[in-house]
């Protein structure tokens, strides 16, 4: 899971140099790099595959993803899913409609990250339905294709959110829970690992190669983080981290 590609920023912002190194490593080690939609189509045959699989996702819809990430993806013939917060479209730092169309034309998957990037668990039923349906229809109007995948702002979901998403026409949901995905994974609870600013290429390699000690440590830290989030609440937790988007 990627976010901003800039020289500096919050913990989820990485440099273009780091991104290039990470994509080069995936190519050198012969990973099959796919979008979320490809995971769905290949899910039933994973056990028969010998090639290592990595799914790339980009949250929020920052225009720097178009400038710095798309060329690297094309260079290696990688596919990815771009989850777009539709209120950011045509803003100073968001994708333009034209860029979204180009991504789709180049066979990248376009998914929803809601309209306003609000924590969905805090919303009434009507507002929740609006965030999921409106963002989906806005993106479909731009790319003229079905939008079937949703990324949860902050990675938070519950049964009410999943039911509303299913009624809205979504087929997959990405969370921010650290776990791998296989043929038995619930398509409404897909796990992801955020790639952060301070990750070395060695750590990135261990993450994608499923190094047990690294994953155990990361899951432990996430468990502690989730407990702090519950105690502080969404708004206070993110204000302490000075992060608007996740």
Image: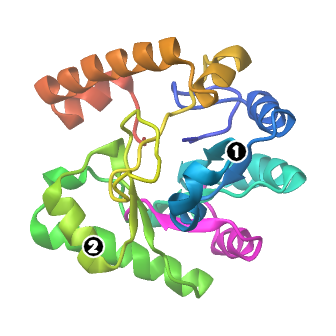
In the rendered image, residue 186, in percent from the top left (x then y), is placed at 33, 55
Foreground tag (1 vs 2) = 1
Identify the secondary structure beneath mark 1.
loop
Q: Are marks 1 and 2 in contact (CB under 8 Å)?
A: no
Identify the secondary structure beneath mark 2.
helix
- Nearest to N terminus: mark 1 or mark 2: 1
* Residue at mark 1: 50
- Give the residue drawn at x 65%, y 23%: 204
- Give the residue drawn at x 35%, y 16%: 221
Extreme-front residue of the structure: 48
Camera-side residue of 155 and 187 = 187
Camera-side residue of 185 and 241 = 185
Q: Is residue 19 magenta?
A: no
Asked if residue 38 lies left or right of residue 232, the reply is: right
Asked if residue 75 lies left or right of residue 57, the reply is: right
Camera-side residue of 186 and 71 = 186
Say which quadrant the C terminus sits in.
top left
* Whether residue 94 is visible: no
* Whether residue 244 is visible: yes
Q: Residue 179 appears in which quarter of the rendering?
A: top left
Badge 1 crowding class, 10 Å Cα cut-off, few under 14, some 14 to 19, many 20 or more, is few
Asked if residue 99 lies left or right of residue 160, the reply is: right
- Give the residue drawn at x 56%, y 49%: 47
In this picture, is 236 found above or below 167?
above
Residue 166 is labelled as 2
In the rendered image, residue 161, in percent from the top left (x then y), is placed at 20, 61
């Amino acid at each position: 899971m990627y976010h901003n590609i800039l020289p500096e920023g919050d913990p989820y912002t990485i440099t273009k140099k780091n991104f290039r190194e990470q994509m080069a490593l995936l190519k050198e080690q012969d990973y099959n790099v796919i979008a979320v939609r490809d995971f769905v189509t290949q899910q039933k045959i994973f056990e028969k595959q010998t090639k290592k699989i990595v799914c790339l996702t980009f949250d929020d819809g920052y225009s720097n993803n178009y400038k710095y990430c798309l060329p690297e993806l094309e260079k290696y013939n990688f596919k990815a899913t771009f989850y777009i917060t539709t209120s950011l479209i045509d803003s100073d730092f968001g994708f333009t409609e034209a860029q979204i169309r180009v991504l789709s034309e180049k066979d990248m998957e376009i998914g929803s990250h809601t309209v306003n990037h609000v924590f969905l668990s805090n919303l009434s039923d009507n507002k929740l339905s609006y965030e999921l349906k409106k963002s989906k229809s806005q993106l479909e109007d731009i790319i003229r294709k079905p939008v079937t995948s949703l990324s949860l702002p902050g990675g938070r979901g519950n049964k009410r959110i999943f039911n509303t998403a299913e009624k809205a026409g979504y087929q997959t949901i990405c969370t921010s829970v650290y776990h791998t995905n296989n043929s038995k994974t619930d398509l409404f609870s897909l796990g992801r690992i955020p790639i952060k600013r301070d990750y070395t290429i060695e750590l990135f390699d261990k993450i994608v190669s499923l190094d047990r000690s690294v994953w155990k440590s990361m899951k432990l830290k996430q468990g502690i983080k989730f407990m702090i989030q519950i105690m502080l609440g969404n708004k206070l937790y993110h204000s302490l981290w000075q992060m608007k988007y996740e």
